[in-house]
């Protein structure tokens, strides 16, 4: 056997191995996605259990809502300022800087508000959920629930998913508001656009109502997206926790996967939701 | 060979591997209704894995686990839940829900699976805590009590639904001799007066003598020895002799 065919054989072997590896991780990915979709459906079918889970639901509302207000405010403020600065410099070149309010308001309400809120929720609440449920998993507490015939989805997942789906739009409103105000501050101080003009154009931009539902479309489509994102973050984080195995290491892995997968899923869902909500 | 009506738990040639570790290699034994069967075996011999098979937390790779005539791998989810409501499981590591207090941990199975009123539930909780000698830890969280206390709360949680079958994974671990004696008396009493069928994994000889009618010795994935308690500790089997150091 000469060296060329050796190299060819090696290369072929390596590519087959690589393909198999890809297939395995692809299968794993499909399996995980299937589990999460199933979990989402199970949660929807148990919505009527919510009154019984009131205590954990309110608890989760508080920890994911109140405890994150300052983060959302801080990030929202700076994102609004960045938007205003970036767009403002560009608009000023064409003497269009009085349009800055429109651009900041529409970007915040349509995209940035819901998306930033979802990312913050994934990083703070999602990681905590995965760690909490993952710790229960590795300490046999989930087995104990199973043995006691306690429905894990209704007991653990449902209150958390509903709490996040409800709190996300509220946080988004805060994020949008502070972002628009921050944008106005930058517009005034850096671009010399008056506060009154800025606010008028911002509010005018958000007034446009939808054709199907007679509500300010950008605002409510954004809030709807935020609610879906909140639910996605909770379901993915809970599913990572439920699947955690192998001690503290496993909990760490579950936590990092929860944040990573939540953000990916939010971005993908964002595209499709935008497509559905805005296609004409 | 006992008749089928007499047998409540039966394992038939159960095999189980984790990765390349072949833990159970054709394990077979049965437990009669009302019997208290002890299980001994080296650390890592698969005792906890066996108990997990009996309650359906694990499924065998080959062989069958039959509880009250139902194959645990074949029954519907609803039947499995119904069967589990008749069973109690004392976990080796207690497995209390860490964000619920002791009393809430005990109340949980009653709230979730029965129609008892809150007053009845709190009575039951207080009574069961008394049985395991933890009268005043009701409002503590699991991380605020000792290992031995956790173990007893785990025992109380398994008993609070008044199960017909109880699987104990080292019920005496971490208990002082006095409390250990009274816990063993409790296990024995449940089996004598309420005909509770029990499977007790235990390393301590005095404890097994206090509770078990018969003992099996697990070795290399099978039940190597099965003897009445009177003769178990005076064995012919060389492996068991070596294990017991006699
Ligand atoms: N879920 C699992 N995944 C991988 N391996 C496992 C799993 N459960 C048990 N094992 C392995 O099976 C073997 C038997 O475990 P098991 O817990 O049944 O031992 P044991 O007889 O109860 O020991 P001990 O007396 O120390 O409690 C161990 O080697 C363990 O590593
Ligand atoms: Mg064990």
Image (tube, grey):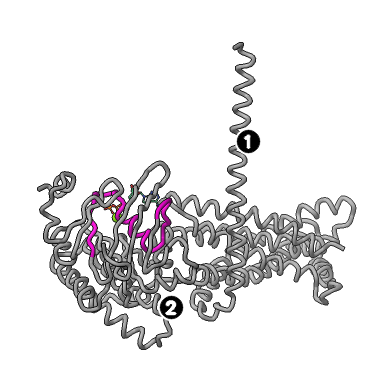
Label 1: how many Cα within 10 Å (few below 14, some 14–19, many 20+): few
Magenta-highlighted residues: B37-63
Write the residue at 57% across / 74% down: A46
The numbered disc on residue A19 is 1
Number of callouts in the render? Answer: 2
The answer to if B141 sits in the magenta stretch is no
The answer to if B52 sits in the magenta stretch is yes
Label 2: how many Cα within 10 Å (few below 14, some 14–19, many 20+): some
| Direction from residue A83 to residue B190 in the image, left or right | left
| Disc 2 target residue | B113
Q: Position of residue B195 (x, y in %)?
A: 25, 75
Chain letter, disc 1 residue: A
Q: Could you say which quadrant of the image residue B185 lies in?
A: bottom left
Q: Position of residue A17 (x, y in %)?
A: 59, 32
A154 or B197: which is nearer to us? B197
Chain letter, disc 2 residue: B
B25 or A147: which is nearer to us? B25
């Amino acid at each position: 056997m000469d060296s060329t065919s050796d190299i060819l054989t090696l290369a072929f072997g390596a590519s087959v191995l690589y393909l198999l590896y890809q297939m395995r991780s692809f299968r794993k990915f499909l399996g995980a996605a299937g589990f999460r979709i199933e979990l989402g459906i199970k949660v929807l079918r148990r919505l009527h259990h919510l009154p019984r889970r009131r205590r954990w639901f309110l608890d989760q509302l508080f920890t994911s809502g109140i405890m994150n207000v300052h983060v959302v405010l801080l990030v929202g403020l700076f994102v609004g300022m960045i938007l205003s600065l970036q767009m403002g410099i560009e608009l000023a070149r064409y003497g269009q800087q009085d349009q800055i309010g429109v651009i900041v308001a529409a970007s915040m309400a349509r995209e940035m508000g819901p998306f930033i809120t979802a990312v913050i929720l994934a990083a703070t609440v999602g990681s905590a959920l995965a760690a909490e449920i993952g710790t229960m998993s590795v300490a046999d507490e989930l087995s104990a629930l199973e043995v006691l015939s306690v429905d894990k989805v209704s007991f653990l997942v449902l209150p958390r998913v509903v709490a996040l789906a409800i709190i996300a739009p509220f946080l988004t409103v805060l994020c949008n508001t502070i972002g628009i105000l921050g944008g106005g501050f930058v517009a005034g101080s850096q671009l010399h656009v008056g506060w009154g003009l800025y606010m008028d154009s911002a509010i005018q931009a958000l007034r446009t109502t939808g054709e199907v539902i007679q509500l300010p479309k950008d605002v409510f489509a954004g809030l709807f997206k935020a609610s879906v994102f909140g639910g996605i973050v909770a379901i993915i984080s809970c599913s990572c926790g439920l699947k955690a195995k192998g001690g503290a290491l496993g909990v760490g892995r579950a936590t990092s996967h929860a944040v990573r997968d939540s953000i990916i899923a939010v971005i993908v869902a964002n595209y499709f939701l935008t497509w559905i909500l805005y296609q004409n | 060979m006992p008749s089928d009506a007499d047998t409540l738990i039966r394992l038939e040639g159960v095999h189980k591997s984790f990765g390349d570790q072949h833990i159970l290699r054709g394990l077979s034994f049965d437990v009669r209704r009302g019997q208290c069967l002890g299980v001994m075996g080296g650390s890592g011999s698969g005792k906890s894995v066996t108990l997990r098979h009996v309650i359906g937390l694990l499924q065998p790779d080959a062989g069958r686990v039959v509880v009250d005539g139902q194959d645990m791998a074949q029954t519907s989810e609803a039947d499995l839940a119904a069967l589990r409501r008749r069973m109690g499981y004392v976990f080796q590591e207690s497995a209390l829900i860490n964000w619920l207090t002791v009393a809430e941990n005990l109340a949980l199975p009653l709230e979730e699976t029965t129609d008892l009123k809150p007053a009845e539930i709190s009575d039951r909780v207080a009574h069961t805590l008394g049985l395991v000698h933890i009268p005043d830890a009701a409002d503590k969280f699991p991380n605020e009590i000792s290992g031995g206390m956790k173990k007893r709360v785990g025992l109380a949680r398994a008993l609070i639904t008044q199960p017909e079958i109880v699987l104990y994974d080292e019920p005496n671990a971490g208990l002082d001799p006095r409390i250990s004696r009274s816990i063993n008396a409790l296990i024995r009493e449940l089996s004598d007066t309420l005909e509770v069928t029990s499977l007790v994994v235990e390393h301590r000889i005095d404890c097994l003598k206090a509770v078990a009618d018969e003992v099996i010795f697990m070795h290399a994935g099978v039940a190597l020895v099965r003897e009445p308690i009177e003769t178990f500790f005076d064995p012919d089997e060389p492996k068991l002799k070596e294990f017991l150091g006699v």
